[in-house]
Amino acid sequence: MGLSAEQLRSSLDALALIEPAFAAALAHAGYPEPRIRDRGYATLLRTIVGQQVSYKAADAVWAKLEAVLVDATDPARIAATSDEDLRAAGLSRQKTGYARSLAEEVLSGRLDLANLPADDEEAIVQLVRIKGIGRWSAEIYLLFAEGRTDVWPAGDLAVQVEIGRILGLPERPSEKAIRELAEKWRPHRSAATVFAWHHYMFDPATQSAKNSAI
């Protein structure tokens, strides 16, 4: 349920009118492909699995975990699986705890992923109550799985680097600075985020980013 290609294009065209530097960057790198994930428990679990590892490593662990759980979309499967089996699938002790915390929140009804608050900040507050889900993970979930149009993960290093590059800044802007810079981009900051990653990976100097978590 992430932003569609049409939504991305529309928002980026609007950004190009607000910020001329975006127009030049779009001409250089083109429009990004949509990044869409399913709404719900499995996507958040996969977010936990992928923390601090490359895409390839995360995919390998996820494949093993799916084989162990049989149905990775069912939080009850985590509760019914031993720590030893979860560790054998590649989850660290810490991530095993995080996975169990997420499953407990969903099974208890304390977290209803089908009915998160419409306000982004309120939704983030609910998500970060889960062990292992920080602000960045919550923002990425709202962007990719819910398709929210104005999510701005200002703490993301790649976003900071590439927005600084797109705007021609002399150095990477801080999280505080990039939040202030992006205020005038509302309500199109989700598209700005996706484009920043696209532009970052498009640049030959940052090809190694293809092995990062974004």
Image (spheres, rainbow, N blue to C red):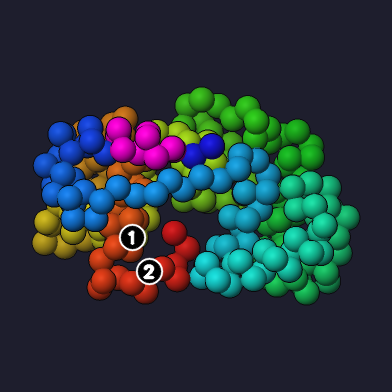
SS class, disc 1? helix
Can residue 4 be found in the magenta stretch? yes
Image-based side of 193 in relation to 83, left or right: left
The x, y position of residue 161, in whole percent, is 26, 60
The x, y position of residue 40, in whole percent, is 65, 40
Q: Amino acid at mark 1?
A: Ala
SS class, disc 2? helix
Could one spot residue 40 in this view of the protein? yes
Mark identifier at residue 209: 2
Say which residue appears at 79% left-offset and 37% top-offset. Answer: 108
Q: Nearer the viewer, mark 2 or mark 1?
A: 2
Q: Amino acid at mark 2?
A: Ala
- Confirm or deny contact between disc 2 and disc 1 (CB under 8 A): yes
Along the viewing direction, whichever of 92 and 29 lies nearer the viewer: 29
Along the viewing direction, whichever of 5 and 200 lies nearer the viewer: 5
Could one spot residue 83 in this view of the protein? no
Can residue 127 be found in the magenta stretch? no
18 relative to 27, above or below: above
Mark identifier at residue 158: 1
